[in-house]
Image (cartoon, rainbow, N blue to C red):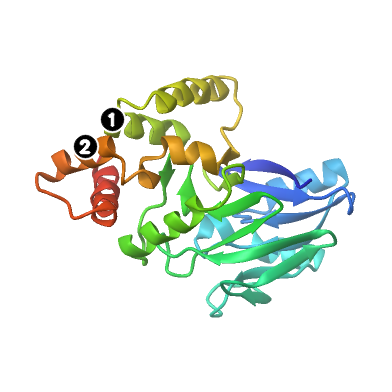
């Protein structure tokens, strides 16, 4: 069983650690936007890193890479192209990476938030950076709405039990927007209450899972009647189908 934990950073980021019982004390680090909190956990708990995995190039996911890689002399897996400082093991869609004994992930290209965005899937767990959020999805930078729509569709096809390890604690804000878009969704209302309780206790709302996201996340529900009706009303015109609904929904969230 893959053991995972989030390390909070920058107020709403999560740097993820993952390990397996077959390699006690060793972990991989996913998207270290800063090194300090990671080193503190390593030193206080006697852990050691075996590799770093990067989903995309934004500073709050990579700025800790140089210090960690230099300090611990570990490989850094990430998007190819040479544009991310410190990546020593470039990977592409379909690659299988084995960053630790007993641990392997399939690399998924999920462009949209950025054109080079990757996700890592294995052991029933998905590290998806800023592509899929709990009840939301990432903004568009140099990717397109079409790319992000299809990337999210790809992730939504993973097994319902897949644990989803997003890189930000945006859940309550996302849920507020989602309930405005789909006020008749009883699963969404119930989940929002549970998430608020977790945050009131100072606990993360992550990981979530794909099955939950299929029930509550409007960006994965663009074929649903109530979502389409709400987005159509916002647009003030007929929409061609789920992809156009998604594009307008993303714009709506950006301007909300």
Residue depicted at x 47% and y 54%: 131
Q: Is residue 206 rendered to the left or right of residue 1? A: left
From this view, report whether residue 244 is shown above or below residue 255. below
How many other residues sit within 10 Å of disc 1, few (<14), some (14-19) or many (≥20)? Answer: few
Viewport quadrant of the N terminus? top right
Q: In percent of the image, x 55 and y 48: which residue is there?
A: 167
Instruction: Look at the image and tell me whether residue 128 can be seen.
Output: yes
Q: Position of residue 62 (x, y in %)?
A: 58, 61
Vertical arrangement, residue 83 with respect to residue 225, above or below: below
Residue that appears at 54% across and 25% down: 199
Is 199 left, or right, of 144 in this rendering?
Answer: right
Relative side of 234 to 67, left or right:
left
- Residue contact between numbered discs 2 and 1, judged by CB atoms under 8 Å: yes
The residue that mark 2 highlights is 230
Q: Give the image quarter of residue 101.
A: bottom right
What residue lies at 40% left-to-right and 61% top-to-bottom? 150
| Residue 194 placement (x, y as % from top left) | 52, 22
């Amino acid at each position: 069983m893959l053991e995972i934990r989030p390390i909070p950073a920058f107020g709403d980021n999560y740097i993820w650690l993952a390990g397996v019982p077959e390699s006690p004390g060793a972990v991989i680090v996913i998207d270290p936007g800063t090194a300090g909190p990671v080193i503190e956990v390593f030193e206080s708990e006697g852990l050691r890193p075996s590799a770093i995995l990067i989903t995309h190039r934004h500073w709050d996911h990579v700025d800790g890479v140089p210090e960690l890689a230099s300090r611990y002399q570990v490989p850094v897996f990430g998007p190819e192209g040479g544009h991310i400082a410190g990546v020593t093991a470039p990977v592409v869609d379909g690659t299988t990476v084995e960053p630790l004994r007993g641990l392997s992930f399939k690399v998924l290209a999920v462009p949209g938030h950025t054109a080079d965005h990757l996700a890592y899937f294995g052991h029933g767990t998905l590290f998806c950076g800023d592509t899929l959020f709990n009840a939301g999805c990432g903004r568009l930078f140099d990717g397109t709405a079409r790319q992000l729509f299809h990337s999210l569709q790809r992730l939504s096809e993973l097994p319902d039990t897949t644990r989803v390890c997003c890189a930000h604690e945006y859940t309550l804000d996302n849920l507020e927007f989602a309930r405005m878009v789909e006020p008749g969704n009883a699963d969404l209302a119930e989940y929002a209450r549970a998430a608020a309780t977790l945050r009131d206790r100072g606990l993360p709302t992550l990981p979530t899972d794909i099955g939950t996201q299929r029930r509550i996340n409007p960006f994965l529900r663009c074929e649903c009647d109530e979502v389409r009706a709400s987005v159509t009303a916002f647009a003030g015109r007929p929409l061609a189908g789920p992809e156009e609904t998604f594009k307008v929904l993303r714009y709506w969230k950006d301007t909300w």
